[in-house]
């Protein structure tokens, strides 16, 4: 049994979850699925654990390889209103039992959130409020890939799309201080419960490659942005706008700026065809990193991409993360943004720490989003 901890960016009285077997190779059966309010650890607040049903009332669901399934609506009756201050920052406990063998699991490696797992073959424990049956921890999410809430028609959904710097590498474990988290808090202060920010970052992700992702030959960064955009971004419930930060992993793999820019043009076209506003974010410097990301050659290509983002007029707006985080004397990441916030140590000169992510989240001009609220 998995007991996954997730933080809704927006609360609602009715919700649903989506379980995914997109990267599996065999059908997977889930039963005894529950959703409740977390107290601490893997414990559920007394009286809040609600059973989740599928396909109009079934308590179990079998998902074929390559597919995902949304649950029936769940009445979340402990939510008084989406703007309830007592729920701000609180987290949901989503529990489910995997019945039988799953084969390769669809998962998100870098959740940066502690979740809980029962012992193998220990049976189903989702309905239990105590976490006593969950002795093991994980900082990844398995099978669960979305939590939706029923929201007002004027809610604006902003998807933050990208790689590990959007995923939050080197931020604080359980701290919810990635740059999308910072942006969410700022947008909430300005627009209240009329906004929801979704993080669609994957560590190691690239714009261009792999040409085709396969469960038989997986790569750590997952499907390319070109392949996953329609599912992971345009396919999100109610999505209105995208802030896109990506490209550094392409450059470390030997791609040139022109190829990455061509990929960006294609996604912008697809996004606009889907009615989305696409905001381009400049790529943060990794000059001096002890990896292929940190070479002068890769940095020159990065600067060429950033020049395109800033000046070509291809995007609906620009977010200059590079300017917010780069040391003008060295051309690399500012020293104060380098130490790793989760593990300590000097950092890798590629991923910003908590302070760096705060600077990034604060660098976003909230005026970019104002027209989206005005037209609703």
Image (spheres, rainbow, N blue to C red):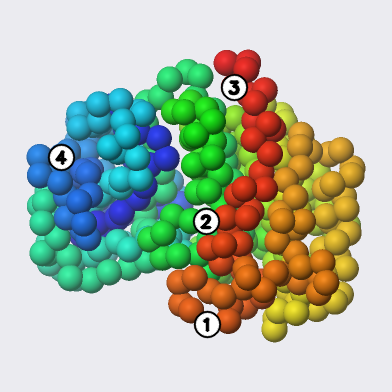
Residue 180: x %, y % from top left: 55, 48
Residue ID for mark 4: 48
Question: Residue 146's quadrant in the figure?
Answer: top left
Name the residue at 30% across, 25% down: 81
Is residue 90 among the parts visible in the rendering?
A: yes
Residue 85: x %, y % from top left: 32, 34
Q: How many other residues sit within 10 Å of disc 1, few (<14), some (14-19) or many (≥20)?
A: few
Is residue 60 among the parts visible in the rendering?
A: no
Residue 177: x %, y % from top left: 48, 56
Element type where label 4 sits in the image: loop
Name the residue at 58% across, 58% down: 357
Name the residue at 86% across, 65% down: 301
Q: Is residue 72 left or right of residue 18?
A: left
Residue ID for mark 2: 178
Among numbered discs 3 and 4, the one appearing first in the sequence: 4
Element type where label 3 sits in the image: helix
Residue at mark 2 to residue at mark 3: CA–CA distance: 24 Å
Residue ID for mark 1: 345
Say which of marks 4 and 1 sits in front.
Answer: 1
Name the residue at 81% across, 74% down: 330
Considering only vertical position in the picture, is 53 above or below 68? above
Q: Which mark is residue 120?
A: none
Element type where label 1 sits in the image: loop
Among numbered discs 2 and 1, the one appearing first in the sequence: 2
Considering only vertical position in the picture, is 48 above or below 175? above
Among numbered discs 2 and 3, the one appearing first in the sequence: 2
Among numbered discs 2 and 4, the one appearing first in the sequence: 4
Q: Residue furthest top?
A: 375
Say which of marks 3 and 4 sits in front.
Answer: 3
Residue at mark 1 to residue at mark 3: CA–CA distance: 42 Å
């Amino acid at each position: 049994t998995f007991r996954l901890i997730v933080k809704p960016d927006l609360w609602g009285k009715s919700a649903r979850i989506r379980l995914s077997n997109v990267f599996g190779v065999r059908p997977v059966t889930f039963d005894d699925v529950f959703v409740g309010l977390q107290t601490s650890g893997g414990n559920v607040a007394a009286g809040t654990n609600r059973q989740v049903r599928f396909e109009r009332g079934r308590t179990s669901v079998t998902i074929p390889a390559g597919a995902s399934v949304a649950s029936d609506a769940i009445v979340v009756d402990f939510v008084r209103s989406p703007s309830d201050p007592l729920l701000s920052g609180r987290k949901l406990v989503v529990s489910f039992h995997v019945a039988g063998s799953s084969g390769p699991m669809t998962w998100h490696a870098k959740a940066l959130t502690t979740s809980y797992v029962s012992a193998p073959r220990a049976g189903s424990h989702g309905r239990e409020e105590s976490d006593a049956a969950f002795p093991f921890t994980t900082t990844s999410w398995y099978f669960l890939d979305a939590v939706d809430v029923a929201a007002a028609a004027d809610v604006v959904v902003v998807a933050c799309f990208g790689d590990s710097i959007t995923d939050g590498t080197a931020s604080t474990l359980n701290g919810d201080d990635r740059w999308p988290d910072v942006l969410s808090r700022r947008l909430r202060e300005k627009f209240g419960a009329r906004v929801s920010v979704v993080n669609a970052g994957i560590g190691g992700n690239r714009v261009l490659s792999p040409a085709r992702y396969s469960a038989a030959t997986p790569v750590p960064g997952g499907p390319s942005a070109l392949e996953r955009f329609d599912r992971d971004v345009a396919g999100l419930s109610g999505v209105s706008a995208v802030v896109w930060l990506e490209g550094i992993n392409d450059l470390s793999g030997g791609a040139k700026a022109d190829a990455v820019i061509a990929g960006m043009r294609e996604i912008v076209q697809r996004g606009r065809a889907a009615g989305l506003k696409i905001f381009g974010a400049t790529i943060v410097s990794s000059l001096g990193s002890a990896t292929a990301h940190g070479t002068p050659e890769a940095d020159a290509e990065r600067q060429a991409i950033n020049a395109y983002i800033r000046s070509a007029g291809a995007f609906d707006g620009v977010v200059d993360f590079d300017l917010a985080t780069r040391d003008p004397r060295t051309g690399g990441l500012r020293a104060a943004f380098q130490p790793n916030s989760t593990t300590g140590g000097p950092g890798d000169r590629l991923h910003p720490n908590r302070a760096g992510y705060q600077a990034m989240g604060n660098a976003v001009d909230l005026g970019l989003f104002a027209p989206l609220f005005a037209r609703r």
